[in-house]
Amino acid sequence: MQTDTHQPEQFRTELHDWLSDNCPQEMRDGGSGESAICWGGKRWEFTSQAQKTWLSRMAAKGLTTPTWPKAYGGAGLSRAQEKVFTVEMAAINARSPLQSFGIWMLGPALLKFGTEEQKQTYLPPITRGEVRWCQGYSEPGAGSDLASVQTRAEDMGDHYLINGQKIWTSYADQADWIFALVRTDREASKHTGISFILIDMASAGVTTRPIRLISGASVFCETFFDNVKVPKENVVGEVNKGWDIAKYLLTHEREMISGGAQGLTGGRALGAVLAESAGEGGLTDATLRAEAMACEVDALAVDLTLERYKDQAEAGRGVGDASAMLKYMGTELNKRRHELLMSVGGSDALEWDGDHGNLPADWLRTKANSIEGGTSEVMLSILSRRVLGLPG
Amino acid sequence: MMQNLLRTEEETMLADAARGFLDKAAPVSALRELRDTNQSYDRGLWKQMAEMGWTGVLVPEAQGGADMGHAAACVLAGELGKTLVASPFLSSAVIAATALRQVSDDRALRALAAIADGTATYALAIDESAKFNPASTAMTATKVGNGFRLDGKKTFVVDGGLADRLLVLARTGDDDALTLFDIPSDRAGISRTRQSMIDSRDAANVDFDAVKATGDDILGELDDAMSVLRPAIEAGQAALAAEMSGLATGAFGMTVGYLKERQQFGVPIGSFQALQHRAAHLWCEIEVTASAIANAGRMLDQDPDNATLAVSLAKARATSTAKLAVSEGVQMHGGIGMTDAFDIGFYMKRARVAAEWLGDYSYHAEQVARLRGF
Ligand SMILES: Cc1cc2nc3c(=O)[nH]c(=O)nc-3n(C[C@H](O)[C@H](O)[C@H](O)COP(=O)(O)OP(=O)(O)OC[C@H]3O[C@@H](n4cnc5c(N)ncnc54)[C@H](O)[C@@H]3O)c2cc1C
């Protein structure tokens, strides 16, 4: 398969053929819940041989990161080609071969702010699923007010010495590396003394303690840094200018969270999913049906908005602050959808791992969507200040 | 739904040109003046719209049109909506033009030319009760000799009080046997009563009492109104959605302006987070609706036989967004928002009329549900 072809139809045909030859049958179940995700990393245990095969075949083609440059392990697809890729993947109900914070967050930040050496070092292992990253932003005292992070990085001449605590670090106990915001200048104002640094989780002095979530899972942790030595070249961008990178990365995180919201019914109409969970006779309750219709209307329009903003990014006009809109609308919608799914399921949907799969866990998980990556309220504040130009 | 949803350069230029022209020629104060002098629209403005090629936006070039397509028609409708420009643009340039293009016989081509040069205006006479429901049409066209006899009552005939011609939907048999007639509005037996609508625009009750029609008056085929009417209605719904989206943007602009300007407690009211978040939420809704409008325009241009979902999605979204924009607009203006002297009320009244025209929120949400399989 040639990914650099300029003939759209040829590209589609070749991609189609390659996917049908190479996607293992077990990976064609459209699985998109937590259990279907392949996160990769040194400690990753593949759930099946098929999962492993699928990852290695896709990675070899650069298709775990379709739009990244080939030089760093991507497939170098254009936006138009990426659309075709999405459609062709959906056509065979293919699972995503790999998902990770490296793909969603660190990669885009390194592509924009990293040195050539950093890109060469860190990006290819992300595309191959060999190194798993986590995000060290939040601290007990720095949530929505992220710029007040206190974790310190002291300049020791040839390295930095890190001390402090992060919290809500998703998958810190599974990750190989962490990208973190640390304070490198305590005299400077809040936003100007922060650096963006890459830390090996295997370093001496790093410990993690999992926290149990309302869904019963424990996907996030407290992360402690106790005199952790980090080479100076691990700073991305300029020292004390980490806030710009932090914000840029957040726009990608927000897009990802809003996009993830769409995937939860696997691209199927909400109504069809609801009708299925409603069982025999379908969705007959008039109130629920009306709610579902309104939700579907909004979901389709939010999907189109994601498409429109991707088109805009492709045309060279960045998404910028509008990512706050995508995040806010996508996550609030996703919560609405899951409330509906729970209502339709009734008492059948109240059991952990019941007939409806782990719907309660998914429902509870969606509540975090409008908190993680910046809360809905913070999104609205960003929009009112930066887009509407309202004072304060 | 895979086309590029961004405006083309041509569409952007059209929008800019339209905005520049309308801000001078048809600001909201023009609507106020029309209302105060008991007029429905400004014929001089309509003539200018014809000269700029807007009335011919969907008319083939051979008939003197600009033939720019539905996405462009939506762009124009959006700009018209921002300042609540009153004109028969949707009825004539969008709905009638689209209907006539489905036929393309000599008579239809002449009619298209007359729309493009601004000499003929049309209205769609379809509703018979308080809700849009073409399938339940009761008005009859009875065969008499070689021709027909039309009897019945139409209501909420938008632009019907002044239109030169009427597109009339009448029953010619049981079930789906509906036929579309294209007749002059002054034909014997037609009586029109102007409705005093809250948006101050032209709408009429039209009574048909033994109105004579011939086979030549039929647009399309006997008993098959829908192959002509469905595309026309969908084009109208999309453009109306675009108008409402423009209306929401216009009301929103006024509101944000007021948030920055009005001082209470010694600060601009726009510094209160409760209002900031509501304004930001409204902006999000407007952005999301804009995507649905762009998609509807593209679908009508590229795959018109499968555009129903896109169009109903656009109209449903535009209806709820416009409602939110005007409600929030009035609330955030406080007392002044309730005064006739202030413009925001015009937006509220137009949004309510547009919400009902060509299918309300429930109608379109139901279409979406049906097409999405539930
Ligand atoms: C499942 C999950 C996974 C996460 N994963 C990670 C991760 O991997 N890495 C990481 O660094 N962080 C992670 N987070 C943390 C997340 O980014 C923070 O929880 C979030 O930024 C909010 O901070 P907080 O929890 O301190 O809440 P707070 O900031 O204390 O907010 C509490 C409430 O106050 C509101 N509020 C705060 N400030 C304002 C304001 N100015 N105006 C109006 N309202 C305001 C908030 O909207 C919220 O409703 C995760 C969170 C969750 C739930």
Image: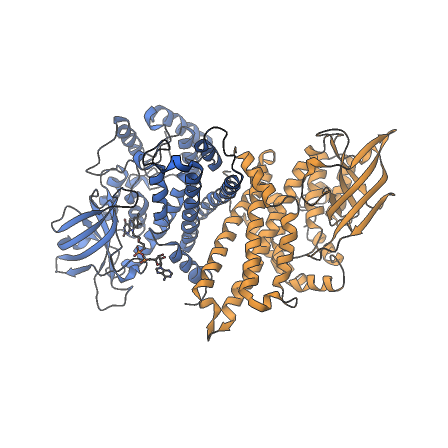
Single out the residue that lies furthest toward the bottom: B266
Ligand 1 lies in which image quarter? bottom left
Residue B11 higher or lower than B136, as above or below: below
The chain in blue: A
Count how many numbered circles sit on residues in the image. 0
How are the residues colored? by chain
Residue A24 appears in the figure = no
Nearest the viewer among A381 and B334 is B334
Residue B315 picture location, percent across and down: 59, 45
Residue A259 in the figure: left or right of residue B171: left
In the rendered image of this protein, which colour is used for chain B? orange
Give percent across and percent down for residue B151: 82, 38
x, y percentage for residue B228? 70, 35
Figure quadrant of residue A334:
top left
B28, A14: nearer the viewer: B28
Q: Nearer the viewer, residue A312 or B148?
A: B148
In the picture, measured across the screen, residue A10 lies left or right of residue A177, that is right
From the viewer's perspective, tell me whether residue B108 is left or right of residue A69.
right
Residue B26, compared with residue A352, is above or below; it is below
Residue B113 is situated, as x and y percent measured from the top left of the image, at 75, 44
Above or below A202: residue B340: below
Is residue B194 rendered to the left or right of residue A196? Answer: right
Q: Residue at x 57, y 39 (%)?
A: B366
Q: Is residue B192 visible?
A: yes
